[in-house]
Amino acid sequence: MRPVMHGDLTALARHLLTLAAPDRPTACAQLMAEADAADRYRKRLRRAHPHWGNGTLMARALALPHLPEPRLQNPDYARCLILALTTLTQRATRNPRPLTALRLASPPDMVYHSTKEDTAMPKTQTKLAQIDPVWNRILTEAHEAVKNEPMLGGLIHSSVLHHGTIECALAYRTALKLASGEMSEQLIREICDTAYNADPALALAARADIMAVYDRDPACHRFLQPLLFFKGFQAVQAYRVAHWLWKTGRQDLAYFFQMRVSETFGVDIHPAARIGKGIMIDHAHSIVIGETAVVGDNVSMLHSVTLGGTGKEEEDRHPKIGEGVLIGAGAKVLGNIHIGHCSRIAAGSVVLHDVPPKTTVAGVPAKVVGEAGCATPSITMDQLLRDSLM
């Protein structure tokens, strides 16, 4: 078993950077414990693995944007890296492991430890970049699906098993759905391939969206289902390509994608809208999201939701949805208003004013009826008001 390498620690620091500062020490200790447990398990099986924790740390980092190193000019990132090193040093004192010399550095120095393996790091990092837990699981489920239902073999092979990466599968599936007599499948596929190659964040967001659907939709039992069958997921991925086109100055082509998504899925998302990752749109019928709308990470919404404007003003006129918000079926959120993080909007409500964080609103017009009922309403998907009524 090789010692802990710089790549492991930077991966852990990237993961910690996504968490709130008070949560980082606990998460750091827990993730290191998971990595140690994975190593011990593989040692009992006598299956040596070249990466600490069977790639646990690096696999977590795959869900994050890969920015060039060094990034210690970011003080918050540097603090996360120092926390990882400190925790590792404390664990090594209680349970020594074959660590080489570690040098704790402060910004803007690089954290580095010198070993003979340093010369092999570029090759190792290339191999690590090929680790993709989400895509690997989709492939496994696809093989099992073909075995259980041979009639779907052609669909599953063409949509999943024929492709080497999730980016290729997403591009193929989007092109297949949006193609028409106005633009061929091949042309749309080329556009999608260009987008995924130019912006890795698109596929990273798709992975987060798959996890969101799997975690929150009781009708989703496999990672494979959103990619093949769920139009909410497919519509969001097509929007992400359209948004990339919009940002790169290709507005007319972005509008074409918006039109085809609306015609195909019944979901109308303006390509200029900004939508985070970890999005779950259940049933996804009659969804409307306007041009200046902003949707934060880990938001869940059901069918017939409108994030619309009021009047004919051309400036900022659409809602800003915070992170972790749950929007019930048929809810209408209108105007340039802010919906606080981890709040709930009851089904059928019409929201015309700002909503405080961690609250539940209901009615026409919507009013605050209590607290959100839990810390993460978009994940629990509990829409009943029994715990929220004042």
Image (tube, rainbow, N blue to C red):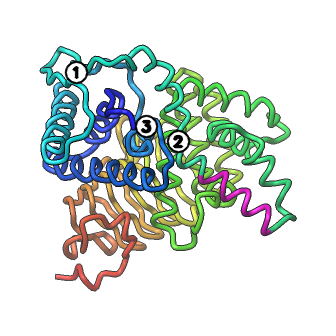
- Alpha-carbon span between mark 3 and mark 1: 19 Å
Whole-angstrom CA distance, mark 2 to mark 1, is: 43 Å
- SS state under label 3: loop
Q: Which residue is mark 2?
A: 270
Return the x and y of residue 387 as percentages of the image width and height. 24, 82
Residue 57, which numbered label?
none
5 is within the stretch colored magenta? no
Would you call the spot at circle 3 few (<14 residues within 10 Å), some (14-19), or many (20 or more)? Answer: many
Q: Amino acid at mark 1?
A: Val
| Sequence order check, earlier mark of 3 and 1 | 3
237 left or right, relative to 12: right
Q: Earlier in the sequence, mark 3 or mark 2?
A: 3
Q: Could you tell me residue 46's position as x and y percent?
A: 49, 50
Which residue matches tag 1? 111
Q: State the image quarter where residue 385 is shown.
A: bottom left
Real-space Cα separation, disc 3 to disc 2, in angstroms: 43 Å
Query: What residue type is disc 3 on?
Result: His
Whether label 3 touches label 2, CB < 8 Å: no
Q: Are marks 3 and 1 in contact (CB under 8 Å)?
A: no
Across and down, in percent, residue 326 comes to 37, 64
For residue 138, side relative to residue 176 (left or right): left
**In front: label 3 or label 2:** 3
Residue identified by numbered label 3: 51
Q: Is residue 176 above or below residue 195?
A: below
Q: Residues within 10 Å of mark 1 (few under 14, many from 20)?
A: many
Q: Residue at x 39, y 38 (%)?
A: 1
The secondary structure that dominates the magenta segment is: helix
- Tag 2 secondary structure: loop
In the rendered structure, which segment of residues is drawn in magenta?
Answer: 137-148
Residue at image position (54%, 21%) is 249
Left or right: where 147 falls relative to 5 = right
Residue type at the position of mark 2: His
